[in-house]
Amino acid sequence: MIRFSPAVLRSLLAFAALGLGFLGALLVIAGNAGGWALIALGLPLSGVLALAGDALGREFGRTLSQRSRALAAQTAPWMWFVALYAALKVPVPLWPAGFPLLGLLSTGALFVAALLFVWERENAAKAAIMAALAFAVGLGVEVVGSRTGIPFGDYSYAGAPAPTLLGVPLIVPLGWFALTLTATCLSGGRPWLAGLLMMLWDVGLEPLMTAQGYWTWHDLLGLWAGAPVENFVGWWGVGAFLAWLFTGLAPRLFGLRALEWAWALPWFARAFPVGGGPSLSLLPCAAMSRADFRVVYAVEAFFLPGGLVLVGRSVEAAVTLVAMLAGLSLARWVTRRDA
C-alpha cells in the first residue's frame, strides 16, 4: 500500500478538489449550469483540504480550526499576493474575453508577490534592484528578439493585447522577474537548472499565449506551437543569466554561502546583519514560515495545462504537464542534499 507524507496527501487532495472546480468550469463553458455547483464546491474545498486533508476523521474540525488560526498568524504579505495571482486565474474559463485583463492583473499580483518576498528575506532596495534588472533584461530581449529574431527566432507582437511597452505586452517583462525568481528558488540557486525550469515552463506558454494572440510565430523551422528550437535555447539562456544575477545579488536568499556582489551594490542595498533589516513577516524572525517562492512553479503546473485544455489544446496540455512535473522532479533530485 502506498503511503504519502501528510504534506503530499494534503497537496493531492487539494489538487483533486481544484480538479472538481475545473470540471465545473468545463461544464459551464459547455452550457451546463450545474457546473456552477461544482465550482462553488471545489474551490473552497481545495483550501480546506490543503490545510487539514491529512486529518480526515474525528480530529478534522479541530485540526482545521487550529491550522486556520496558525495560517492567519503566519501568512506573510507576499503569500496573499500569490493567492491573489492564483485566484485571478479562476474566472478565465468563465470570461474568456477577459483573459487579457485577468492575465495582466494575475501577473501583476505575482510581480508584487516576488517583490515582497525578496524584501522580506533581504531588503527593499535589493528587491527593487532585482525587479528592475529582470524587467529591463526581459523587456530588452523581447524588443530585440521581436525585431531581429535573436535570441528566440522569428516572431512578432503585432496584434498583441494592450497595454504594451515598446511594442511588447506589459505582461511579458513583468513575468520575467517572478518566473525567474521561482525557478531560481526551486533550483537551489543553480542558474543552469533555473534556466531549464524556465524552458520547460515555456513549453506550455507557447501554445497558450499564441492561442490568445499575444505573439505570432513566423519561423520556418517552427517545432512546437510555431516556436523553433532556438526559442527554447534562448529561454534557457536568458533564464540562466537572470538566475546568475539573482544568486550574485542575494545568495543567501537561495540557500547559498557564496559572497554577494557587495562591490556592485550601493551601501543601502547590501545585506543587513542576521536578524536585522526590514521584515514584512507577521511573525518574529524565529517563527517565520519556511515557505518560499518555489510554490509558484507547482501552482503553474496545475493552471497552465488547465488553460490549454480550455482553449482546445489537450495534447499540448498533456505535454506541458509532463514537462513541468519532470522539472519539479529533477529539481527535487538535484537539491535533495542541500542544507
Image: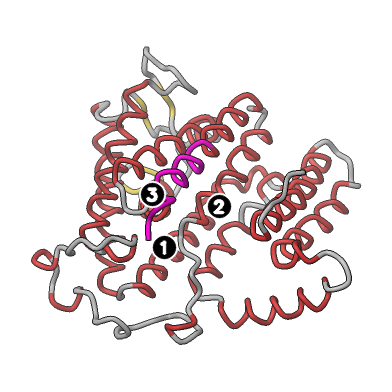
- Which residue is disc 1 drawn over? 114
Could you tell me which secondary element the residue under label 2 belongs to? Answer: helix
Quadrant including the N terminus: top right
Q: CA distance from mark 2 to mark 3?
A: 31 Å
- Which residue is at a point 52% across and 38% down the rendered structure image? 324
- Which residue is at a point 29% across and 50% down the rendered structure image? 243
**Residue placed most toward the observer, 333 or 226:** 333
Q: Which amino acid lies under the numbered mark 2 shown in the image of this protein?
A: Leu
**Residue placed most toward the observer, 200 or 314:** 200
**Residue placed most toward the observer, 6 or 88:** 6
- Which residue is disc 3 drawn over? 187
User: What main secondary structure does the magenta stretch of the protein show?
Assistant: helix
**Residue placed most toward the observer, 251 or 296:** 251
Left or right of 135, for residue 58: right
Q: Position of residue 163 (x, y in %)?
A: 43, 50
Residues in magenta, as a range: 326-339
Quadrant including the C terminus: bottom left
Of the numbered discs 2 and 3, the one sitting upstream in the chain is 2
292 falls in the magenta region = no
Marks 2, 1: nearer the viewer? 1
